[in-house]
Amino acid sequence: MTDTREDEVTLNRAKYGGRTAQRQAPASPRTPRITRLMALAIKFQDMVDRGEVRDYAELARLGFVTRARLTQIMNLLLLAPDIQHVLLGPDLGGVACPERQLRGISSLVPWSAQRRAWTRASRAAKESRASRHDSERRRRDSKVLSQHEI
């Protein structure tokens, strides 16, 4: 059995009189956790459908998580397709709905009820985020003003 390992190492040769390394593009922003979990649920369901694993219990053992946690992740598949699409999109549109809140939404059976709950939750998340940014901006501005008074 052969194990391979690939590592990426960036060397700064300019420091030692060598050529300068080419500048790399800045790292892209991290994928939101809920997006990764949604994609994982889809991948896991595909594995079960194709027979790669027997059931969710086997997936839990392979993933070193409890069956309860795996069930929480897999229940994201119960969300309405348009909500799943938003969660998988490249940009959540500033909506950072916590996973715990999504679990409550996914427990609603009619998709219309899920959509209403999603709209309320995303609106509340946007308002909370806006007020948090406003308070941070006020705090930052007051700090700048106090530094100029010194």
Image (cartoon, grey):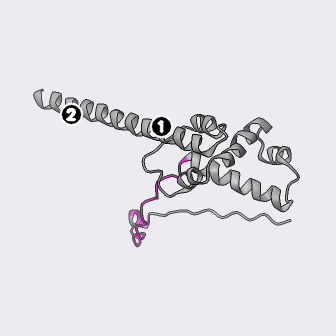
Q: Main secondary structure of the magenta part?
A: loop
What residue lies at 88% left-to-right and 52% top-to-bottom?
54
What residue lies at 68% left-to-right and 46% top-to-bottom?
78
Q: Seen in the image, is 75 located left or right of residue 36?
A: right
Residue 62 in magenta?
no
Mark 1 residue element: helix
- In which quadrant is the N terminus drawn? bottom right
Tell which residue pokes out farthest to the right in this image.
54
Foreground mark, 2 or 1, reads 1
> Percent from the top left, x then y, of residue 148?
12, 32
What residue lies at 27% left-to-right and 35% top-to-bottom?
137
Q: In the rendered image, which residue does mark 1 sit on?
A: 120
Q: Which residues are magenta?
A: 15-32
Tell which residue pokes out farthest to the left in this image.
149
- Circle number at residue 141: 2
Q: What is the quadrant of residue 125 in the picture?
A: top left
104, above or below 1, in the image: above
Q: Residues within 10 Å of mark 1 (few under 14, many from 20)?
A: few
Q: Seen in the image, is 130 located left or right of residue 74?
A: left
